[in-house]
Image (tube, rainbow, N blue to C red):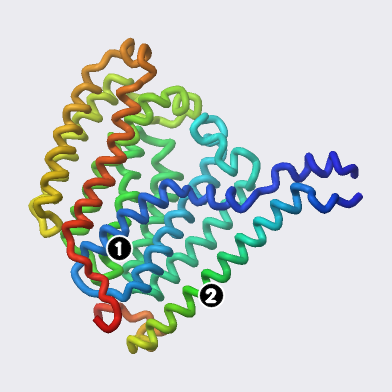
C-alpha cells in the first residue's frame, strides 16, 4: 500500500476535537450554566470541590446523551446542513463508536455523581439521559410535531439536579427553574426551524413548520412566549427572586412579547426578503433571555458554597 | 511502506493520546480530591455506602 493510499485511508481518523464535538459542547454549556444556578440557589452547604465534581459529571452526563443522540440520528444529521458536519455524519467517528462512548460515559457520570453527592442527584441525571435519548430522540422526535414541547423537559432537568446535589431533595424553587427552561425550549427551537426550514423538510422530521405550516408555528411561538413570560414572573414571586431578577425579568419579558408579536404578524414575503433576519434575532435573543434570567437567579441567591474553615 | 516522521496521521494520534492522558490524569485527580474531602469531612463510610448527604 502506497503512502498516498494510506493517507486517504486515514484522512478521516478522528482528532481529539472530534470526540469533544461528539459531546455537543454548546448543549453542555447550557447544562453546566443552569445546573450551577440550581446548585447556587439551593439552601444548604456543600464543599466547593464536591460542587465542582458534581458539575463536571452533570456536564459529562449531558455530553453522553449528546453522543447517543448523534448515534441514533446519524441518518438525519447527514441530511441537514446544520448537522452534517458533526463527527458521525462527517465520517470521523462511526455511529457504533458514538453509541458505546455514550453508554460508557453515561454510566461513569451517573455513578460518579452518586458517589460525589447523593443518589437522588444521580437518579435524576440517569432519568435525564433516559428522557433525552429514549423519549425524545428515539420516540418523539420523528413521531410528533410536539417533539420539542415534551422532549424539552430533558434540557430542563439540570437545575433540579444541581439543587438535589446540595439538598438531597427536589424543592419547589427547582421545579420553577425547570418550568422556565421547559417553556422556553419550544419557542427557541421553533424560531430556529423558521430559518432552517429546508433542513427539517429534507430530513422528514415532523417539526411544527413541516406539519402545521409556518403561520401556525409563528402563532405557537407567540402563545408559548406569553406562557413563558408568566412562568418567568412566577419565578419572581419565589425565594429565587429579588430586585435584580425583577428588573431583568420585566425588561426581557416585554422584549420577548414584542418580538414574538412582530414574528407572528410577519408575512413570508418579508421573511424571504430579509433572509429571516427577525427569526434569527428572536433565536439569538432567546439564548440571551435564558442566560440573563438564570444569571439574575445566581446573583440574587446567596453564595452557599462553604469553604472549609469558614 | 512506512510513514514519514512528520506525517499528519502521527500528529492526530499524538493529539488524541495526549488528550486521553489528560482526561485520565484529571479523573485520578478528581478521585483523589473526592477521597480527601470525604475523609476530612468524616464522610468516608457515607461515600462507600452511598447514603444520601441529607440523611
Q: Are marks 1 and 2 on the same chain?
A: no
State the quadrant of the N terminus of chain A. Answer: top right
Rendered image: mark on residue A162: 1
At 52% from the left and 71% from the top, the residue drawn is B27
Helix, strand or loop at label 1? It is: helix
Rendered image: mark on residue A83: none
In the image, residue B22 lies at what x, y percent? 58, 65
Above or below: residue A108 compared with residue A13: below
Above or below: residue A207 compared with residue A301: above
**Where is residue A175, by image quadrant?**
bottom left
Residue closest to the eye, A84 or A33:
A33
In the image, residue A85 lies at what x, y percent? 57, 36
At 31% from the left and 43% from the top, the residue drawn is A150
At 25% from the left and 78% from the top, the residue drawn is B54
Residue indicated by mark 2:
B28
Parent chain of label 2: B
Between the residue at mark 1 and the residue at mark 2, the CA separation in whole angstroms equals 23 Å
Amino acid at each position: 500500500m502506497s503512502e498516498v493510499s494510506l493517507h486517504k485511508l486515514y484522512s478521516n481518523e478522528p482528532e481529539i476535537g472530534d470526540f469533544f464535538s461528539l459531546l455537543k459542547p454548546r448543549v453542555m454549556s447550557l447544562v453546566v450554566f443552569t445546573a450551577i444556578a440550581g446548585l447556587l440557589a439551593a439552601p444548604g452547604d456543600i464543599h466547593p470541590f464536591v460542587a465542582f465534581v458534581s458539575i463536571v459529571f452533570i456536564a459529562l452526563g449531558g455530553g453522553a446523551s449528546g453522543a447517543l443522540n448523534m448515534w441514533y440520528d446519524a441518518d438525519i444529521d447527514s441530511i441537514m446542513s446544520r448537522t452534517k458536519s458533526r463527527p458521525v455524519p462527517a465520517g470521523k467517528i462511526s455511529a457504533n463508536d458514538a453509541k458505546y462512548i455514550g453508554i460508557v460515559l453515561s454510566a461513569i457520570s451517573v455513578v460518579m455523581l452518586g458517589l460525589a453527592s447523593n443518589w437522588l442527584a444521580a437518579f435524576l441525571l440517569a432519568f435525564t439521559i433516559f428522557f433525552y435519548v429514549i423519549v425524545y430522540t428515539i420516540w418523539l422526535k420523528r413521531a410528533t410535531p410536539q417533539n420539542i414541547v415534551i422532549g424539552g423537559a430533558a434540557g430542563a432537568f439540570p437545575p433540579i439536579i444541581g439543587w438535589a446535589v446540595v439538598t438531597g431533595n427536589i424543592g419547589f424553587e427547582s421545579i420553577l427553574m425547570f418550568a422556565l427552561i421547559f417553556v422556553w425550549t419550544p419557542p427557541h427551537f421553533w424560531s430556529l426551524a423558521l430559518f432552517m426550514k429546508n433542513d427539517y423538510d429534507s430530513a422528514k422530521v415532523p417539526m411544527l413548520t413541516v406539519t402545521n405550516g409556518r403561520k401556525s408555528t409563528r402563532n405557537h411561538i407567540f402563545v408559548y412566549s406569553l406562557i413563558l413570560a408568566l412562568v418567568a414572573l412566577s419565578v419572581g414571586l419565589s425565594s429565587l427572586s429579588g430586585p435584580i431578577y425583577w428588573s431583568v425579568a420585566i425588561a426581557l419579558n416585554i422584549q420577548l412579547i414584542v418580538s414574538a408579536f412582530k414574528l407572528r404578524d410577519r408575512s413570508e414575503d418579508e421573511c424571504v426578503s430579509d433572509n429571516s433576519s427577525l427569526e434569527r434575532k428572536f433565536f439569538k435573543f432567546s439564548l440571551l433571555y435564558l442566560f440573563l434570567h438564570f444569571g439574575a437567579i445566581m446573583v440574587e441567591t446567596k453564595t452557599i458554597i462553604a469553604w472549609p474553615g469558614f | 511502506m512506512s510513514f514519514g516522521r512528520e506525517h499528519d496521521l502521527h500528529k492526530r494520534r499524538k493529539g488524541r493520546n495526549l488528550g486521553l492522558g489528560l482526561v485520565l490524569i484529571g479523573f485520578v485527580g478528581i478521585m483523589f480530591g473526592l477521597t480527601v474531602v470525604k475523609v476530612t469531612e468524616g464522610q468516608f463510610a457515607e461515600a462507600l455506602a452511598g447514603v444520601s448527604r441529607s440523611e
